[in-house]
Amino acid sequence: QKEVEQDPGPLSVPEGAIVSLNCTYSNSAFQYFMWYRQYSRKGPELLMYTYSSGNKEDGRFTAQVDKSSKYISLFIRDSQPSDSATYLCAMSEGGGADGLTFGKGTHLIIQP
Amino acid sequence: ETGVTQTPRHLVMGMTNKKSLKCEQHLGHNAMYWYKQSAKKPLELMFVYNFKEQTENNSVPSRFSPECPNSSHLFLHLHTLQPEDSALYLCASSPLNYGDGYTFGSGTRLTVV
C-alpha cells in the first residue's frame, strides 16, 4: 500500500532560521521525489524534483533523498516570512504520467 | 497564473444539483489530472488522462464523471454529491515524462449543502 507520512505541524520558526521538513514512506519502488509549496487559496507549486537518492540544491533550498531509510528532507536556509506556506512532499514509482502520492503537508510559519 | 486555469474558483451546490468544473492548460502537456484536497488529508488522485485517454480511475464514486475532449481541456461533471464531497478540487497537467513536475491550477473550492 502506498503511504507517505508527513508531520502536519504547524512548525513555527524565527526569521533567518534553518528549516528542516521531512517525509517517510513505505513503498520501496518510489524513485521520483518532489517538494511542492502551497500558499493559502492557491494550488501547489513545484519547488524541488529529485530522482533516486542524493542531494539537490537550488538557492536557499536543498532536497535530500535517502532511499535506504525511505526518508526525504527539504532544508530551507535563511528562512523568510514569505516562506510561510504548506509544504507537500510527493513521490512516484515511474517517471511517466501515473500520478503522484502526496504527504498531508507541513504548515510552516516563519515569524518576522 | 501558472498556465493551468480552473473555473469556477468557488462553487456551492445542493445535493440534487448537477454542475461541472473546468480546467484548461496551454502548456503543451499531454497528461492531465484531477486531485481532491480535503482538510488534514493528503491530496487524493482521482483521474488521470494521457492524450485524452483515461488511464486511471482511482476508485472514485460514479457521481464524479470526468471528460477530456482534447489534451488542453478537462472537465469534472458532478451530480448528486454528498456533503463529504466538499473539498478543494485541483487540476494538474504534466508532460508524459514529468521531469518538470506537475503544474497545478488554483483549484475549485466546492461546498455541497
Image (cartoon, coloured by chain):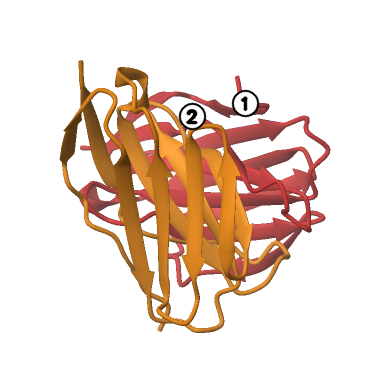
Chain colours: A orange, B red
Q: Is residue A105 visible?
A: no
Pointer 1: what residue? B2
| Mark closer to the chain start, 2 or 1 | 1
User: In which quadrant of the rendered view does residue B48 lie?
Assistant: bottom right
Mark 2 vs mark 1, CA separation in Å: 8 Å
**Within 10 Å of the Cα at label 2, are there few (<14), some (14-19), or many (20+) other Cα atoms?**
many
Residue A110 in the image, given as x and y percentages of width and height: 23, 26
Read off the chain for label 2.
Answer: B
Q: Secondary structure at mark 2?
A: loop
Residue drawn at point x = 78 percent, y = 30 percent: B26
Residue drawn at point x = 32 percent, y = 31 percent: A85
Q: Is residue A3 above or below residue B62?
A: below
Tell me if A101 is positioned left or right of B99 in this view. Answer: left
Q: Is residue A101 visible?
A: yes
Q: Secondary structure at mark 1?
A: loop
Residue drawn at point x = 49 percent, y = 39 percent: A61
Q: Pointer 2 and pointer 1: residues touching (CB < 8 Å)?
A: yes
**Within 10 Å of the Cα at label 1, are there few (<14), some (14-19), or many (20+) other Cα atoms?**
few
Residue A33 in the image, given as x and y percentages of width and height: 55, 61
Quadrant of the image containing the C terminus of chain B: top left
Residue B56 in the image, given as x and y percentages of width and height: 61, 69
Quadrant of the image containing the N terminus of chain B: top right
Circle number at residue B106: 2
